[in-house]
Structure formats: C-alpha cells, structure tokens
Image: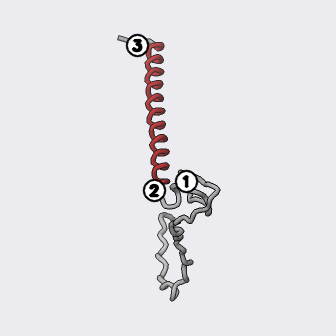
Amino acid sequence: MTVSGNDAAARRERLLRRTRTITLGIAGGAAVASLGLGTALAHVVPGHGRPAAAPGATAPGHAVSGHTAPAASPPPARVPHHRPLAPPRRPPASTPAAPQASSGGS
C-alpha cells in the first residue's frame, strides 16, 4: 500500500502540531512552577517577607484616636552588622605552577 504525498504531509503536520502543543504545555508548566517557587522562597529569605513598618506607624487593626495612651512597644529588631573581611595574617603559600600541557605539533 502506498501513501500519497498529501496524506504523508497531513500526518506530518498533525504530529508537529501535537508536539508543539505538548512542548508549550511543558514550558508553561515549568514557568508557572518557577514563578511559584521563586515567590515561596522570597518569603522564606530573611528581609524579603513582609516589609518592616516605618517608625511611628500604627500596626494594622489599631485605630488612632485623638488621645495618646502609653503603649508598650516591642524592642526594635536588631539588624546584624557584618564586619568587613580582614586581610590574611600571612600571605598565601606560593606553589609552583602546574606544567603546561600541549597536544600535537612538533
């Protein structure tokens, strides 16, 4: 049984369309997963979750009235201060350079 040129071309187009559809679905799913993981990890990394309230700002749910009542506020969060790296106490030990490898040639 011989297959005509039109049937072969139609079959090829149908297979290519199916392949493109599957590829687009996989790429879209990967993009959505990447976005989801990026968002989830951004909330886990310190300093990337909720923005800190500005000094003097009221907490959500607390109404500000004309009366000033003494409020117990929590101590401010401590920000770790990192020291700059110090130079090494002694220079690194010098090691002889590795021999150069060459291939071919005369």
Q: Which residue corresponds to mark 3? A: 3
Name the front one of labels 1 and 2. Answer: 1
Question: Is 24 situated above or below 15?
Answer: below
Find out whether the residues at labels 1 and 2 contact each other: C-beta distance under 8 Å: no
Kind of residue indicated by mark 1: His
For this orientation, the residue located farthest to the right is: 66
Kindly report the distance in space between the C-alpha atoms of the residues bearing marks 3 and 1: 78 Å
Going from N to C along the chain, the mark reached first, 3 or 2, is 3
Q: What crowding class fits label 2: few (fewer than 14 Cα within 10 Å), some (14-19), or many (20 or more)? A: few
Judging depth in this view, the residue of 8 and 64 nearest the camera is 64
Q: CA distance from mark 3 to mark 2?
A: 59 Å
Amino acid on which disc 2 is placed: Val
> Between disc 1 and disc 2, whose residue precedes?
2
Disc 1 secondary structure class = loop
What is the quadrant of the N terminus in the image? top left
The residue sitting at 56% across, 65% down in the picture is 70
Q: On the image, which quarter does residue 64 sit in?
A: bottom right
Q: Is residue 34 above or below residue 42?
A: above
User: x%, y% of residue 52?
Assistant: 56, 59
Q: Count the marks: how many?
A: 3
Front residue of this view, candidates 13 and 43: 43
Instruction: For marks 3 and 1, give the one nearer the viewer.
Output: 1
Callout 3 environment at 10 Å: few (<14), some (14 to 19), or many (20+)?
few
Which tag is nearer the camera, tag 3 or tag 2?
2
The location of residue 77, given as percent across then percent down, is 52, 68
Q: Earlier in the sequence, mark 3 or mark 1?
A: 3
Residue at image coords 47%, 14%: 5
Circle on res. 62: 1
Residue at 55% x, 83% y: name it: 87
* Residue placed furthest toward the front: 67
Residue 84 is situated, as x and y percent measured from the top left of the image, at: 56, 78
**Residue picked out by circle 2:** 44
